[in-house]
Image (spheres, coloured by chain):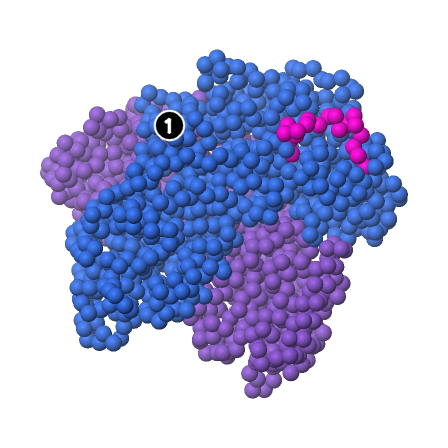
Chain colours: A blue, B purple
Amino acid sequence: MAEAGVATAARPPAEELALIDRYWRAANYLSVGQIYLLGNPLLKEPLKPEDIKPRLLGHWGTTPGLNFIYAHLNRIIKARDANVLYICGPGHGGPGMVANTYLEGTYSEIYPDIPETEEGIGRLFRQFSFPGGIPSHAAPETPGSIHEGGELGYALVHAFGAAFDDPDLVVACVVGDGEAETGPLAAAWHSNKFLNPLSDGAVLPILHLNGYKIANPTVLARLSDTELTDLFSGYGYEPFFVEGSDPTDMHGQMAATLDTVFDRLAAIRARAESGDLSRPRWPMIVLRSLKGWTGPKTVDGKVVEGHWRSHQVPVSGCRDDEGHRIILEDWLKSYHPDDLFDENGALKPELKALAPSGAKRMGAIPQGNGGLLRKELTLPDIRTYAVTVETPGAADEQSTKILGDFLRDALTLNATERNFRIFGPDETASNRLQSVFEVTDRVWQAEILPTDDHLAREGRVMEVLSEHMCQGWLEGYLLTGRHGFFSCYEAFIHIVDSMFNQHAKWLKVTRGIEWRKPVASLNYLLTSHVWRQDHNGFSHQDPGFVDHVVNKKADVVRVYFPPDANTLLWVGNHCLQTWDRINVIVAGKQPAPQWLTMDEAIAHCETGAGIWEWAGTEEEGFEPDVVLAAAGDVPTLEALAAADLLRQALPDLRIRVVNVVDLMALQSPDQHPHGLTDEAFDAMFTTSRPVIFAYHGYPWLIHRLVYKRRNHDSFHVRGYKEEGTTTTPFDMVVMNDLDRFHLAIEAIRRLPSLGRKGAEAVAAFEAKLAEHNAWVREHGEDMPEIRDWKWPYGKG
Amino acid sequence: MAEAGVATAARPPAEELALIDRYWRAANYLSVGQIYLLGNPLLKEPLKPEDIKPRLLGHWGTTPGLNFIYAHLNRIIKARDANVLYICGPGHGGPGMVANTYLEGTYSEIYPDIPETEEGIGRLFRQFSFPGGIPSHAAPETPGSIHEGGELGYALVHAFGAAFDDPDLVVACVVGDGEAETGPLAAAWHSNKFLNPLSDGAVLPILHLNGYKIANPTVLARLSDTELTDLFSGYGYEPFFVEGSDPTDMHGQMAATLDTVFDRLAAIRARAESGDLSRPRWPMIVLRSLKGWTGPKTVDGKVVEGHWRSHQVPVSGCRDDEGHRIILEDWLKSYHPDDLFDENGALKPELKALAPSGAKRMGAIPQGNGGLLRKELTLPDIRTYAVTVETPGAADEQSTKILGDFLRDALTLNATERNFRIFGPDETASNRLQSVFEVTDRVWQAEILPTDDHLAREGRVMEVLSEHMCQGWLEGYLLTGRHGFFSCYEAFIHIVDSMFNQHAKWLKVTRGIEWRKPVASLNYLLTSHVWRQDHNGFSHQDPGFVDHVVNKKADVVRVYFPPDANTLLWVGNHCLQTWDRINVIVAGKQPAPQWLTMDEAIAHCETGAGIWEWAGTEEEGFEPDVVLAAAGDVPTLEALAAADLLRQALPDLRIRVVNVVDLMALQSPDQHPHGLTDEAFDAMFTTSRPVIFAYHGYPWLIHRLVYKRRNHDSFHVRGYKEEGTTTTPFDMVVMNDLDRFHLAIEAIRRLPSLGRKGAEAVAAFEAKLAEHNAWVREHGEDMPEIRDWKWPYGKG
């Protein structure tokens, strides 16, 4: 078997360990108090029913382990003047994080209404999981936290994201053994293949095997140390085991192990500084301790300490059940509060002295409030990259390729700041952002071969075939004050739906917390989208992420459908300058027509939606018969081709063409800050004329967004209706009735007054469509007249 | 280091290996042909431009490895009369799966228009990735496939799901090294802690290290064999390495390794049969072979074989570029088609003889078309479990607890069939389904301690803290002909949004494939829902999965909101009897009022929605002033309490109360098969009266569903508006304006004719709400008169 690490450092003297134990007891006391107590915070009197909260809500089981780790990290920070960020994977151990940031003084600094007094402790207890108070998890409200830890799986990717480009930082990441069963966490161990030992910080994973989830043992806790050593050695770590239940022994083990581990980290850095950048075997700690350690041993004859029964509230009903209340009182008193706090509720000075001071405190480290460190990106002028558009639609470009040129120079301009990275699941080049490789590489700490392409120990591009890891790294990177850009196949961004949820919730909550400074927005480029999954087919076709996104708070989310390269440049540049948002950009990577000059693009994007006068039959005092609208690059092409069909077949028809780039512009301004005023909306879409809306995604979203608009009943939306396979681009839009013919036919159907002329046009369109359908099945490619169609009118 | 396995079996004689090599070449030839050729399928003439497809779409890189494995599995199936299901993780290697099922004869049996002739080969080639043809992946159209392999990550969980309760089956699961980087796959290796060596089948993972993804090396391929051996030993496997590029040597290695590995499987079974059920070290294979093996070595001076450049189409532009066309022709001829197929295109008999026959063929094994094996569940009579409801809302029950009683007996009734399992991320008991533990246990093959609760080597309940694994196991189990039930915290079902997508897409496609027999529906119970996340808070509050679900094809999805236990019984029982669907049931686990008798519940559920006459002020010829509607248990409670408030404050008001249990009933029948007729809908919701709709989730979904209904503009929907924290149940609904007071106030606002009486009632409700808000922040629990409110009218 592979070998486990051996702690060779000496254990600290007994008196030092005794002090640490008292500090730990103080944290445990404050944790239990938060879960249980409404009054009598220092137990100066016997516990009465009314001292106990009517609803007991919280999680004890993981908390003593979290407190144990926190106390020992305090020691090592002081001993080595280290900068340590604490990622609390089991975020439901929130009472522990609150208790520790209170003990070290951060909490009272940030929340002056919770001072370091008896009254302050009383308020600290009362507010926890209490209406109008604080949540039960390590939430945005918790000082030093960048990780809520409610949805499990992302502790380790957040930790690595925080460590990139911050060489002076050690991220101590507690991984619960429940969380360790999740997929994202299981993959995240391999993040060490992307961590540079010289230019990045270190991540110290602490796998906390307390043995149980809610109602079950955990898989890893029931493996032998041999299997665990093999597993983590295979993942590229040197595991150090700290195991037991006797506090004194455990304090000694943990202190010696942390000293040894920090020696290892120093050695790794020294080796890297000497020029050896090969991948080290990074240290990690496996902490086997009891679930609910120091809590009640048994309750009502059932084992509680060291069992899943201590997961939440180990002894319940303490208001009404005197026996249970006595268990609680004995438990609280077992920490000897009078040995920890003075008469006024202040932590005793010899314990206070154990915590680091100032920004070294884990609750006060600026990386835990990354907005403090955020520096705006320096971005190049988008006009430098502008595609020349002399005639709309005359020439094709790969829009994302142009954006790649912009990103390349953005990387260069911020290279010395080292605060901007690009993330993607093996798709940066596939998504046509390959220009970035002119100035940087893909980060890679595993083996590199001479035939490899832009693979290096250092680089600004992070690629791994895991959307979870891309998203998690990026979140960790942003939340510690940096910037990023994530490009992804559109369909597979659903893999991180739930991570998106959690990040959006985090951002929403931070809006109400004054001391949290804004962090850079999370920017998605969704490409290789539903309409052009040429090599793949149905499984790769899903435009529904946007529907998921718009369920979150309006203030947090933005969605853009730039129809060409110049609009994409504006949108990309804009998104990289925003903060505290999630921006979703959907744009194709295939060669596609270019419509707007840069000046037009800027004006169009700034409004969010606009009439393309050159595409309709607009003139002074114009009131259209029908509006053809589009959002998305492929729908824009089809809507314009439909306008062409209609203009040719029905020259008297008064047609307006509207394009929407900022989807939120469709909503009313009371629903979304980007919403057009009703006047502007009505001027664009009319108040009564039929609107044929060609939309990139599932049609219902457009109905939803325009629901409050006057003309909403006249909107007829075409989009993806869940039909697809591996076929040609035009066959794809035909399968979903989004093609030019269907759009034109629908417009005519909405205008019964066109009578026979309309019917003739419909018949002609249907015939052409049938001809195409036969052609494509015969030849395997789109009919040339459709494939090569160009906008024939210029801007006249 | 841990030790790798050593293949001790003898290599087969050279002539046998030579035959296998020819078979492999035949599969490779047919694979390349599918990607490239329109005509000239046997290369009887020189390759002309028009022989080549105009659009070259597909993936070559993984395919030769898949074909290599397939050929060797054929050998071992024949040698041991084994039943092997082939899970093709890299499903984009679809040409290989099609080629092999064609060679073994399955393809032509299922698709008689693709016979085993030259013409048939021509059609086989043409249809691939061609409009009107077949998709590029191992899709539902592919015989023997239960795994499309488009979205990566789920091969191994599907394999384990297929193996459970099928002791005669070996599931050979190819895991691509790209896929191996994903989270779900990384966690799935631990599935061996849930596989019983006696009563379940075996899973043989074959990790295919071909070194590259689309544009990058893979992490695992760049680890040493030492690290890989550690890693997979730690995961509980004995890895056997098959490595190289010389076909003859590789055939010998692979054959000897498979023999050794099947010996290991036999030994594991024998040991289990002898009574030792401790967890074995399961064998697995690590196959290191070249990406694009046997393809062009270089193209345009760039390395292609053994490089990511061979991922899709290794040599492109073969129509126009004569040099490339010659490369293609040389490549195809390197397989010597005349040595493989006779003049008429039939595979030569000595090669044909290598494939198994009948249902032993991997394309024909019934587990690959699981509907063939599906046997309906025997279910108990739901009336046995009916909650007695003498007065609506008088007594509380935990609805999911009652369902648990039903599931317990369903497990018993199907125990001998061994075709029904319950899945959940550590939440079966938390979700109150604990009655099932009266008759079964949680499966667990890791260490078991005396203090463990219902943990056993055998059991029908599968719990692991990974929604991905639960979902993937269940999918594999269903697709091989069995039944299942998945209970999950509502918020975290988003973790499998994308897996849901893929399963829904699979089901949608199978509807058009006659030979695919229906499989049991995938049933979700979403509980611990948004309104009652008492211990957790905002991160655990997200009811948006339903919004995600309804984007899929209407025919595939169903969504139920049973308001109490009897309706939940009806819905659960119904869902377990359906097929080819995805059923989503949302129901709370907390004690809650019970409204309907079983007879009423049956009638209500069969219609999907209905007027609760006893709750409104209905009488003969009644036309309400206002409709109070609800979907979901908590909204139902609030809507009824609002009705009570209104009845007391405004005795003359004509109130109707409607409850919706089958959400799809709201849609028009042309949109969903469960949609109410317009007549029935209008009779229920009126055509003009205000409808105050209290909905469990994000309000917009209701607007979407009723969009085509006459009265849709009068719907005012309240639901979750993304506000939450750790607080009391009633404070949660207040934060989202979904409480009884807000509902009643809104009803009055919609009825301006109520004048001063209405205004007085609003003022009273607002005062009561303010009183409650102050109370809850003072006392930490809901005001007793609200918490203990009961429906006061009985049924009169």
**What amino acid is labelled 1 in the image?**
Asp
Give the left or right position of residue B299, taking residue B431 as reference.
left
Considering the whole magenta stretch, tell me its main secondary structure. loop
Q: Residues within 10 Å of mark 1 (few under 14, many from 20)?
A: some
Q: Residue furthest front?
A: A620
Task: Judge by depth and name the residue closer to the eye, A21 or B143.
Answer: A21
Using the rendered view, name the quadrant where residue B696 is placed: bottom right
Q: Quadrant of residue A358?
A: top right
Query: Do we see residue B731 in this rendering?
Result: yes
Q: Nearer the viewer, residue B152 or B421?
A: B152
The percent coordinates of residue B405 (x first, y second) are 65, 58
Q: Residue at x 89, y 43 (%)?
A: A45
Query: From what the image shows, is residue A307 above or below residue B572?
Result: above
Residue B701 part of the magenta-drawn span: no
Question: Residue drawn at (24%, 38%), measured in percent from left and top?
Answer: B32
Where is residue B583 drawn, in percent x and y?
Answer: 50, 58
Horizontal side of residue B451 vs A172, given as left or right: right
User: x, y (%) of residue A602?
Assistant: 33, 48
| Residue A356 falls within the magenta-colored stretch | yes
- Identify the magenta region: A345-363
Q: In the image as oriented, which residue stretches furthest toward the bottom?
A: B621
Is there any visible trace of residue B136 in the rendered image? no
* Direction top: furthest residue: A274
User: What subunit carries mark 1?
Assistant: A
* A779 is higher (above) or lower (below) than B66: below
Q: How many marks?
A: 1
Q: Kindly identify which residue carries mark 1.
A: A441
Question: SS for tag 1?
Answer: loop
Q: Residue at x 14, y 42 (%)?
A: B51
Residue closest to the eye, B133 or A326: A326
Image quarter (top left, top right, bottom left or bottom right) of the C terminus of chain B: bottom right
Q: Position of residue A434 (x, y in %)?
A: 32, 34
